[in-house]
Amino acid sequence: MKSVIRAAAVLTLSAVVPFAAHAHKAWLLPSSTVLSGKDDIAVTVDAAASNDLFYFDHRPLRLESLVVTGPDGAKVEAENKSTGKFRSSFDLPLKAPGTYRVSLVMDGAFARYKEDGQEKRWRGRAENIAKEIPASATDLVVTQNVRRIETFVTSGSPDDAALKPTGVGLELEPVTHPNDLVEKSEAEFKLVLDGKPAPGVKVEIVRGGIRYRNQLGETTVTTDDNGVFKYTWPEAGMYWIEANVSDDKTTIKDAKERRAGYSATFEVLPE
Amino acid sequence: MRILLSVGLSGLMAAPSLAADMEISIEIPKLDVAEYHKPYVAVWLEGPDKKVAANLAVWYDVANPKQEGDKWLKDLRQWWRRAGRELKVPADGLTSATRAPGSHTIKFDNASSALKDLASGQYELIVEAAREVGGREVLRIPLQWPPKDGTSLNAKGEHELGTVAVNVKP
């Protein structure tokens, strides 16, 4: 009886497991998040991965997976996309007032295998697994990797048509609007996995400007039973949050494990 | 019984029925800086619920030749968050041009469109100033509206605002 209970507990645990991603921090950095005016309103957004937030000194993020959702829920085209040595960059015209959700949505895979006794690593798109990993490979372990990197900008009054979760992977469902964040006030967000509340997930929160201070000063909060987490911004600035989970809900035939990550950049303004 | 009823009714009469005046003077300080632009200024009344009870004035670059004066309205951060982003500008009786250094007076009474529907109660008069390539400052003056007696209240800014004074009288 005891062993049955233990097995059940292990199963529940393995359903969604938080894990730490040991990688560089990936981020989108908008030139502004709160805008006024009627004509020619736009932002420029940088996309990079680095250790220090928000300095582009390591590598650019590719823009193939860029998805921008406008205030009416429809897709918006970015302009002047470019990728340089350290960062990618693009312009986003805000033709209609309201809130825009800027996302890099990645759905890929990584694999470990042995070939002629040699340990090999592979990373790429799921449809290329058969093509790029030799048929002679042994000990093949494929992991699906679903990631979403986001930021938000609002022209005029904030709204939420663009903020509806797509229902795929780990996403943020704002309770407090992401462009309505003020220092020393509490913000509330919900994490959802495939559209359903994600409880017990650790969320790392770091303020930008790391290069000019000695301590990282990161905070970790955990989502409650409803997937909700709350945080009071200690001061104004650009903040980065990240959460990671892993489960077995993979959509890739060869993969047993799925990792789902979410990170976002928020601007917190002075009172 | 009749007395009780009339007391009950007057309790429901939220809008002030008696005459009342509000005169606000706002000092824009003269600053010795290399690049000076007249500040954007927003003046409003806030209720105890921290919501905007009345928008009184917004001074901004209404006549900007490229019509982009509204691009910096967001720099009046508090006003923008609480009221500005929901409003259409320019707005008659609310928006006007920025003012030069000196003292500027604006007057309202309980017949003014901004105040005529204002319920009796405790408010805070808020004056926020934001200057291009400069700073931002917010001053708050608590006041009762409509006033029971003639009162003069003031607050003194340190950076972007000089003395802000409000005179209210029944």
Image (cartoon, coloured by chain):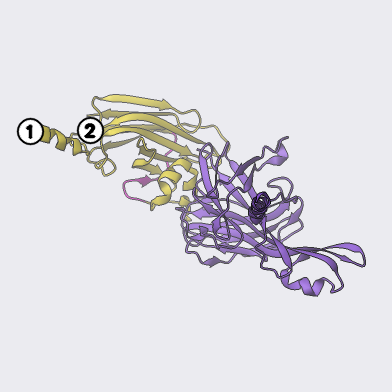
Chain colours: A purple, B yellow
From the top left corner, tell me how far across and down residue B143 is, in percent.
32, 29
**Disc 2: CA contacts within 10 A as few (<14), some (14-19) or many (>=20):** many
Identity of the residue drawn at 53% across and 36% down: A184
Identity of the residue drawn at 36% across and 32% down: B25
Q: Earlier in the sequence, mark 2 or mark 1?
A: 1
Q: Which residues are magenta?
A: B91-101
Instruction: Give me the chain letter of mark 1.
Output: B
Identity of the residue drawn at 47% across and 60% down: A161
Q: Is residue B92 magenta?
A: yes
Residue located beneath label 2 in the image: B20
Q: Nearer the viewer, mark 2 or mark 1?
A: 1
**Viewed as shown, does residue A124 lie left or right of A13?**
right
Q: Is residue A223 magenta?
A: no
Q: Using the image, tell me which numbered label, if any, was put on residue A96.
A: none
Amino acid bearing label 2 = Ala
Amino acid bearing label 1 = Met
**Circle 2 SS class:** loop
Q: Quadrant of residue B42?
A: top left
From the top left corner, tell me how far across and down residue A256 is, in percent.
72, 63
Residue located beneath label 1 in the image: B1
Q: Nearer the viewer, residue B41 or A262?
A: A262
C-alpha distance separating marks 2 and 1? 32 Å
**Viewed as shown, does residue A197 lie left or right of A18?**
left
Q: Quadrant of residue A15?
A: bottom right
